[in-house]
Image: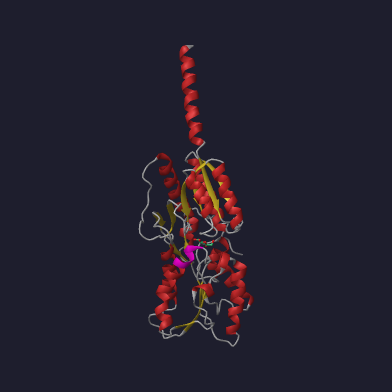
Amino acid sequence: MKKILSLLLVTVLLLGTASAFAAQKVGVAMPTNSLQRWNQDGANMKAQLEAAGYEVDLQYANNEVATQVSQVENMILNGAEVLVLASIDGSSLGTVLQLAKDNDIKVIAYDRMLTDTENVDYYATFDNYKVGTIQGKFLEEKLDLMNAEGPFNFELFAGSPDDSNARYFHGGAWDILKPYYEAGKIVVKSGQTDFETIAILGWGTDDAQARMDNLLTNYVDGTELHAVLSPNDSLALGITNSLQAAGYTLDNFPVVTGQDCDVTNTKNIILGYQAMSVFKDTRDLAAQVVLMVDAILKGEEVPVNDTETYFNGVKIIPSYLCDPVFADKDNYRELLIDSGYYTEEQLKVD
Ligand code: BGC
């Protein structure tokens, strides 16, 4: 009897410890569930954090800053011990981040930097500059800019100016392409080249499509458009929609770049309407963030691999950068299907 009782006691104690552990809450804030990549990020993070024994409060903010602010506030009030935040506007969370600091809650900026605040502890992302470099090098090789005479007509797009990643993407690509532009081998007929003019606030597909429609008025005289630099897939989709609506076909379709390997874009790559994308395996990023959360909550050293690059306007944030990978019609199968990221069915084109 005594034995049974003590066994019971041990079980109760163990269960108690387990549930105290399980009760450690992690708040995960994502910008929107209208873009596939954030849905995947959210789902991956939740699954992996739960598998590691944490309770997860996952919220999507419909791309509305005020919604995200109140979601993060609620996470803090509901007892989250670590916050993983993918912001909409990197500079808009200052007040809630102060609240987090006051409550001793550690903050990891997820994929997008949290700017102009000292209350951010870590940054986990992909090498954003390298994403741009991959796009720029691809265009350089695809059009043989080094050897061909040209000139080549380009139009340029950049991402949302309130997302610090957008400048890294653009910087990486433009550092490769700018010398050709300066030498006159790349011509931008619209004349729109500075970041603010080519940026699409909010990364919207429709806004990109509308801007491309406008740009195409410069080409109604029959001038051939050779390439469009697009920083990501949501913009690439708007761009290709516009080009298709304007009557471009596979015979004269400009070279369009992208990033994220969204399903619709990957199908466009298979069909030939988008030339490439950059694959960022969100499972890797989620796995890394789980390691970081785990280390924080266990008081261990948090794994980072870059302590120099990412200045958020106030301080350098210790970061972990995952590796982005070039993707096109030749390697998408291996990258996306064989690795289990998508099923064959999801990428089926009719
Ligand atoms: C992400 C990209 C994404 C873009 C639009 C950026 O911060 O790094 O992967 O395409 O936001 O959601």
Residue 218, image x, y percentages: 58, 84
Number of numbered discs visible in the structure rendering: 0
Judged by its main secondary structure, the magenta piece is helix
Q: Can residue 168 be seen in this view?
A: yes
Residue 227, image x, y percentages: 50, 77
Residue 50, image x, y percentages: 51, 41
Extreme residue in the bottom direction: 221
What stretch of residues is rendered in magenta?
A: 163-168
Q: In which quarter of the image is the C terminus?
A: bottom right
At x 56%, y 49%, the residue is 72
Name the one closer to the observer, 321 or 108.
108
Extreme residue in the right direction: 245
Q: On screen, 137 above or below 45? A: below
Q: Can residue 243 be seen in this view?
A: no
Name the one closer to the observer, 57 or 247.
57
Task: Answer whether residue 227 is magenta in the image.
Answer: no
Q: On screen, 117 above or below 186? A: above
At x 57%, y 72%, the residue is 239
